[in-house]
Image (cartoon, coloured by chain):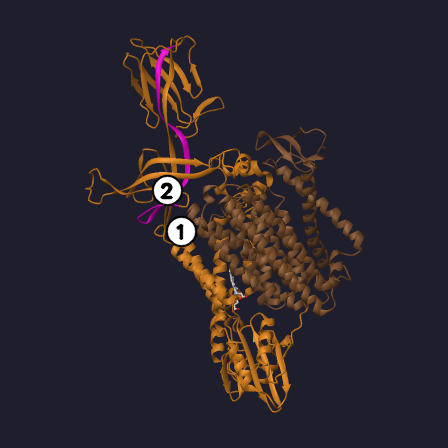
Chain colours: A orange, B brown
Amino acid sequence: MKQMKCECGHVNPTGTVLCEECGKPIEGNQHIDGNDRQELLNMRYDGSARRSQTYNRTVVDKIWNFFSSVKVGVWLIVITVIASGIGTIFPQEMYIPSNVDPAIHYRDEFGILGQIYYQLGFHNLFSSWWYMLLLAMIGISIVIASIDRFFPLYKVLKKQKPKRHEAFMKKQRVFGKTENAQIDVERFKSNLKKQRFKVTEQDGHILAEKNRFSRWGPYVNHIGLIIFLIGALLRFVPAFYIDEFVWVREGETTVIPGTDSQYYIENLDFILETYDQNDERFQEAIQNSGGLVPKNFQTDAIIYERSEEALPGAESELQVVKEDSARMNHPIKFGEFALYQSSYQLNEFDEMTFKIHDAGDEDTNYGEFTVDLNDPQTEYQLEGGYRVVIEDYFPEYELSDGVPSSISKYPKNPAFVFNVYPPDASEPETSFLGIGSNIPANENNEYKLGLVNFDVRDVTGLSVKKDHTLGIISLGGAIFMIGVIQGMYWNHRRIWLQPKKDGVWIAGHTNKNWFALRREIEKAVDGTNIEEPVDQYEMKS
Amino acid sequence: MGDLVSISSNLLYASFIIYLIATFFFGGTIRDKQKGRSRVAGKIGIGITIVGFLSQVGYFITRWMASGHAPVSNLFEYTTFFGMMLVFAFIILYFIYRLDFLGLFALPVALLLIAFASMFPTELSPLVPSLKSHWLYIHVTTASLGQGILSVSFVAGLIFLIRQVDQTKRSKHTSWLEFVLYVIVATVAFIILSSTFSALNYEATFEAPVNGQQGEVTYELPALVGPAGGELTTEGVMAPLFSAPGWMEGQDAAKKLNTFLWSIVGGLVLYGLLRLILRKRLAASIQPLLKRVNPELVDEVAYRSVAIGFPVFTLGALIFAMIWAQQAWDRFWGWDPKEVWALITFFFYAAYLHLRLSRGWQGMKSAWLAVGGFGIIMFNLIVVNLVISGLHSYA
Ligand code: HEM
């Protein structure tokens, strides 16, 4: 196949199916668009020469043709759909409790199916390499398919001439012949213009066209999709994206992770509000949900920045950046970062005060001491000469298989093993103290420890975000929407009129919405003596 | 407050009745041989539909005033709204194509949705903090409008299939079409059963382990299947025929299974009765009514509603959802089941649009795709909410 000169004089590039200027079917190329098996012409890309349909020799050609096929594109989408569906059968790993081994969790919770699910990697589907690969292949397919079609289509629509070959006219889906000497062409043109068609003429042949821009819709939306995908990929680059998490106790100041120790946060107060249980409107629903429906989570905090001037080694100074509250839908923003309210822990123990008293008499008091649960001392010297040594400390106590242990380092359920040294005694008395339990190691213990007082405080969990991909992603989304609307809410329409010795031929084409096209033609031929064309298409079903 | 709530539910009730009446007028357009009279019937039909729609808008506004937030926050409210959007989409497409028979099928689907919605708890419920944002309302209403428009393509697809599938011999097409109609019948059965037993105040309570702890489960339908390891404590009611498997230990899992079984069985009985009366496939009995329908036009309506609905759905269910999620949870996407199924719906209709580009996918095949798309939308609404519930869980 080489370049072909059409009888109209236009030289078409290799692989052209319909002459770019006059639309004449080019002999030997009709199989490309399947025109040889069909009564009507395949007008999808106006018979332009597409690379994928022209070359198929080298490896590059083969890859190009693979990705530019809509069939392949749809298959990729279908596979992605099915995989995604499977990915929702059981919860993804990020939604199962974080303190369990997923291998065991899936087997125990969901049985044999769960185990298979886990072993096939569906528990982490959406970050698995093959899911990524699917998305990447869809991306490549979109790019190649679009390039393959856009440039030829753009060129052919630009080059098209009003004067069409007869075979082109006859093989349009909407076509009609009128035999009548009294055709009012001027009226036809003005009817078309009234419907906002652009009318061009060549030797009495008329082309009326509108909404060509809608043909670019798919390409615009595909560009949007690609930008979106690029934005999503950039999230793996720390310069663009950071996602950290920090726990801060009330009254405490800590460094904010992910900021290179540049920022610090002080938690002034954590607030949890619930819906009023007596609110008439919601009473029924609140009761159904067990009483407590949270209304607001909030952290009041101060953000500090480490001052730049601080000499190396010297104690750096913290300067207040701002005081603000983080709530749902309302993060604290500073610099490139934002802090979001995302978790909390109520009533964590802060301090506990104990006293020593006679085992038999709670009213006696031989001295008190206060343990800071986040930083307990090993030894406390009491005023009455008593000495208390913390032999063991379990911040979150649990008895597992008969052995006392702690499930975390957070003082949610503190328990102690205390050694009490009375004045002058060298042998201590040992006792175990936890919430709701006070057990002497020896029944003959003379002294007992009792809880006098305690302080609790709340802990807030904030996520730390920096995100420079949002702009790119939003841009992609916006372009996508523009493209889809452009392609869907407008349709490209063309109407051709050819003068004949004893009348005219009329043909019409649209990329979608044939009934609307026929209505427009109906209006266009009104009062012109042109007969309404017929739809030559017959649905096979 | 109480007043507004009752005004609101009366308006909803009224719109239900009005849609029902409109359906009959659209029905009149098909039977009537005289063109003039059927045109009048169609005009009245669409007029009444609009009145019903306005009445439902009234329900929406008054309920919003009563609760202080847009009533799209639980399964009842959401499904009702979806029905309303379906009617709205039908009205739009009616004015583009002026097809009366579209109303004859679209309105019953909307009626079913609204009736189905009323089977779920209808009391006003408060919003948890993460749900409190204008973007929530914008997201949910736009997504629902998109789904409503996409559903019209299901309605048109169904009309196409009933009109075009060859009923003279049994085929895959006839069987699947009967299955689709059976599902609709089973939905009707579910509505009839639920409302009958709730009118009778039927209750059967079980003591059963719930998530590992002893708890209580109350059935509103007689128990065909009891909770695993459960013990019936109500006296004088039917004992369950068998127990749910042990792994169904979630809150109400067995109860949902029971309701599901009732719907299947009820649907079978109802469908069987219809077959006995009609002595034909259901689709074969409806087919003659659609003789005058132009299949190409129906095919175009189906396609057009996807073309109109797809951008709206994308905007509402993905883009606005992402904006909301970004604000509420500081991540615009979290792969929770609800999100994934919105994405699946998006992909599905994208595939539909691409397939329509190739020859041979118009007509029958794309009508089946439209039915499948609606299946996905309903799956997202019902199964994902009730079974695979994620963060959004409306139930
Ligand atoms: C999920 C990803 C995709 C989305 C959301 C998407 C969206 C769209 C939309 C909305 C249209 C317009 C359809 C119409 O006007 O009827 C379109 C057209 C098209 N898409 Fe995609 N697309 C995606 C992926 C792909 C892929 C993977 C391919 C690769 C083969 C592809 C190839 C095409 C082609 C060839 C057209 C027709 C262009 C034309 O008519 O000028 N798309 N796409």
Percent from the top left, x then y, of residue A406?
42, 27
Percent from the top left, x then y, of residue A460?
38, 36
Q: Do circles 1 and 2 both sit on a common chain?
A: yes
Q: Which residue is mark 2?
A: A326
Camera-side residue of A450 and B285: B285
Residue B124 visible in the displayed image:
yes
Quarter holding residue B216: top right
Residue A339 belongs to magenta span: yes
**Amino acid tagged 1:** Phe
Chain identifier of the residue bearing label 1 in the image: A
Camera-side residue of B133 and A380: B133
Query: Which type of secondary structure does the marked residue at label 1 adopt?
Result: loop
Tell whether B250 sits left or right of A451. Answer: right
Closer to the chain start, of discs 1 and 2, is 1
Tell whether A243 sits left or right of A293. Answer: left
Residue A130 visible in the displayed image:
no
Which residue is pictured at 55% across the width and 84% down the height? A187
Q: Which residue is mark 1?
A: A236
Foreground mark, 1 or 2, reads 2
